[in-house]
Image (cartoon, coloured by chain):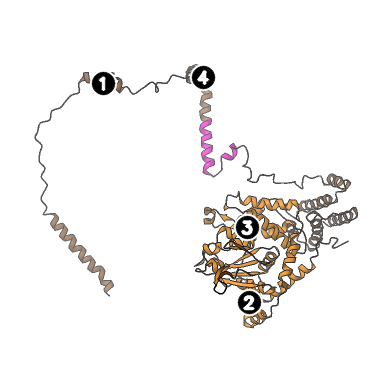
Chain colours: A orange, B brown
């Protein structure tokens, strides 16, 4: 009677094995960043796009590339630049002289895992091209709708907006990202380990050794499994209260949308799966909330000038609301 | 070298211009003002004309609208003030009351200024209650310090509602930990937060095990039978004895 009298209703053995393998694979190359890796895995399981933000040189792109490499699926990379046009991403109809007809030439967005590097280097016109495909998983060009293959995951990296040559992403686009992961500088120990790995030429060898651990079909199946997890009505209400409060908080100019509530639930389910449970606890919710909300809310100008961050306000909101028990 | 010499050169130029300006100033001719020798005839207002104007309706600006009849309230106020003035004149007690009333108002004014100066919100004493939270619901679901756990547990077990009974056991456990000062009970804390507040490892491990059971039953919606509930109850009792 001492341990494990409960068994999950969902068999999570395969899922946990896959998660463990991805973590091991990424952990071989990436030093530290355990939280970022957990969030990326949660994002994959929750069927959400992920925005990774950090100053140059903190392995944002490397992390995204490794995740893509660990999954056996169609991968494409788009480097965003200020002169990039929507058709460069989506594709364009091209005239075929042999058939005398226009044929649609698919752009690099057609794939399973799309790495958009430095997404905020392109202006709003180009960003807007991603709205439909990110939300609806389809593209409409010349009246024809093109469905994306499942899984469809956008992994985007960006520099902080204060950096030279960057644009602020439109709110509508930010809302389409499940998480905004902030990659911080490594600790001193981690920095030493990074230098040591490079010095011993470990990284280059290991990069070529990375083998895919999950297929596209397996990801689709795992997502289906996670979607069916149990969430108590009190926890649903807890999430709703958190999101509702962002719309009434005096420090915030823009609150979170209902899409944020759905994102929190999906992300919490994915985190529960990573933690080996088939139901959501308030701890799961509280853990994902900052990553889901930080890019969806905006501070009032006076609070911004006072040096407050969105994470500070999210912390205040969480402390105001009673944990369901 | 040239940079150093520049200020001397500038100073020389300034002196030259100043001396030249002063020298020229002395040579200016004084201005001559022509005198007006014409005679001025002083005219007087005609008293008749002033009288005629003052009688004219065109210059009577108080019209019918401005002429307001005294209302009942005005009459009442005037009556009270007249009576008060008469009474004050006659009654020395009323004079004393008025005197203290004025002194009281002055004292209240001084207190208000002092509180304001030391940064206390005077409005706090005047408002009916704190401003309600923007959330349109009642915050606290229940206070663990106010629940009669024995009665509630008996009722839940007699109704065979073992899920609720496990929840009550867990809340009771949190109350006991809070009473012993091992955790700080707060509505925003999660079970994991309480787990990390326990400093002794055996206690923490046991609490972790109980928490896992509570979470599966309550958040995971796992139904349990009487046997399973009795086992869980035994674990909670064992943990309580360790505290």
Chain of the residue under label 2: A
| Quadrant for the N terminus of chain A in the image | bottom right
For the image, the number of numbered tags is 4
Q: Residue B34 in the image: x percent, y percent?
A: 10, 41
Q: Are marks 4 and 2 on the same chain?
A: no
Q: Nearer the viewer, residue A16 or A47?
A: A47
Q: Residues within 10 Å of mark 1 (few under 14, many from 20)?
A: few
**Mark 1 to mark 2: distance in Å?**
103 Å
| Closer to us: B55 or A2 | B55
Task: Give how far across and how far down residue B213 sits, in percent.
Answer: 82, 58
Q: Which residues are magenta?
A: B104-130
Q: Check residue B182 for magenta coloring.
A: no
Identify the element where label 3 is drawn: helix
Answer whether labels 1 and 3 touch (C-beta < 8 Å): no
Q: Which residue is mark 2?
A: A194
Secondary structure type for disc 1: helix
Query: In the rendered image, which residue does mark 4 sit on?
Result: B92
Q: What residue is shown with label 1?
A: B53
Residue A293: image tag: 3
Q: CA distance from mark 1 to mark 3?
A: 80 Å
Q: CA distance from mark 4 to mark 2?
A: 94 Å
Mark 4 or mark 2, whichever is nearer to me: 2
Q: Distance between the Cα atoms at labels 4 and 1?
A: 53 Å
> Is the residue B144 above or below the residue A55 in the image?
above
Q: Is residue B235 left or right of residue A244?
A: right
Place of residue B179 in the rendered image (x, y in percent of width and height, measured from the top left):
77, 51
Residue at point 56% right, 74% down?
Answer: A98
Callout 3: few (<14), some (14-19), or many (20+) C-alpha neighbours within 10 Å? Answer: many
């Amino acid at each position: 009677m001492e341990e494990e009298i409960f068994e999950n209703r969902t068999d999570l053995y395969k899922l946990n094995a896959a998660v463990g393998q991805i973590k091991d694979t990424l952990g071989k190359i990436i030093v530290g960043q355990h939280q970022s890796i957990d969030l990326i895995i949660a994002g994959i399981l929750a069927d959400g796009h992920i925005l990774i933000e950090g100053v140059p040189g903190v392995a944002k792109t490397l992390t995204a590339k490794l995740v893509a490499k660990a999954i056996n699926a169609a991968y494409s990379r788009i480097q965003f630049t200020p002169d990039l046009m929507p058709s460069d991403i989506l594709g364009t109809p091209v005239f075929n002289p042999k058939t005398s007809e226009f044929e649609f030439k698919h752009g690099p967005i057609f794939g399973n895992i799309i790495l958009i590097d430095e997404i905020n280097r392109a202006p709003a016109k180009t960003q807007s091209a991603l709205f439909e495909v990110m939300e609806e998983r389809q593209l409409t060009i010349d009246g024809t709708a093109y469905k994306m293959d499942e899984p469809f995951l956008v992994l985007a990296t960006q520099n902080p907006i204060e950096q030279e040559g960057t644009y602020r992403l439109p709110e509508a686009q930010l809302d389409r990202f499940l998480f905004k992961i902030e990659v911080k500088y490594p600790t001193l120990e981690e920095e030493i380990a990074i230098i040591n790995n490079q010095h011993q030429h470990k990284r280059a060898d290991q990069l070529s050794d990375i083998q895919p651990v999950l297929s596209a079909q397996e990801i689709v199946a795992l997502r289906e499994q996670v979607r069916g997890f149990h969430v108590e009505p009190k926890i649903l209400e807890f999430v709703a209260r958190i999101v509702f409060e962002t719309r009434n908080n005096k420090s915030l100019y823009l609150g979170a949308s209902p899409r944020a509530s759905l994102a929190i639930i999906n992300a919490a389910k994915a985190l529960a799966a990573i933690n080996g449970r088939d139901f959501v606890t308030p701890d799961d919710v509280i853990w994902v909330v900052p990553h889901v909300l930080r890019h969806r809310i905006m501070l009032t100008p006076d609070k911004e000038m006072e040096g407050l961050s969105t994470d500070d306000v999210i912390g205040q909101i969480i402390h105001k609301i009673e944990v369901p028990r | 070298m040239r940079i150093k010499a520049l200020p001397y050169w500038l100073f020389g130029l300034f002196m030259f211009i100043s001396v030249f300006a002063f020298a020229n100033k002395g040579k200016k001719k004084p201005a001559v003002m022509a005198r007006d020798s014409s005679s001025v005839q002083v005219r007087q207002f005609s008293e008749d004309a002033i009288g005629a104007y003052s009688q004219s309706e065109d210059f009577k600006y108080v019209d019918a609208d401005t002429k307001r009849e005294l209302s009942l309230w005005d009459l009442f106020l005037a009556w009270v003030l007249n009576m008060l003035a008469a009474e004050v004149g006659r009654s020395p007690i009323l004079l004393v009351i008025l005197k203290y009333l004025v002194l009281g108002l002055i004292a209240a004014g001084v207190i208000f200024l002092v509180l304001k100066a030391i940064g206390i919100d005077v409005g706090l004493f005047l408002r009916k209650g704190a401003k309600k939270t923007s959330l349109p619901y009642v915050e606290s679901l229940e206070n663990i310090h106010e629940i009669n756990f024995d009665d509630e547990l008996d009722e839940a077990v007699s109704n065979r509602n073992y899920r609720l009974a496990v929840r009550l056991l867990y809340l009771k456990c949190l109350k006991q930990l809070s009473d012993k000062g091992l955790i700080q009970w707060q509505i925003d804390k999660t079970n994991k937060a309480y787990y990390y507040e326990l400093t002794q490892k055996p206690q923490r491990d046991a609490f972790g095990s109980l928490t896992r059971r509570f979470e599966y039953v309550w958040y995971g919606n796992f139904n349990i039978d009487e046997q399973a509930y009795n086992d869980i109850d035994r674990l909670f009792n064992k943990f309580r004895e360790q505290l």
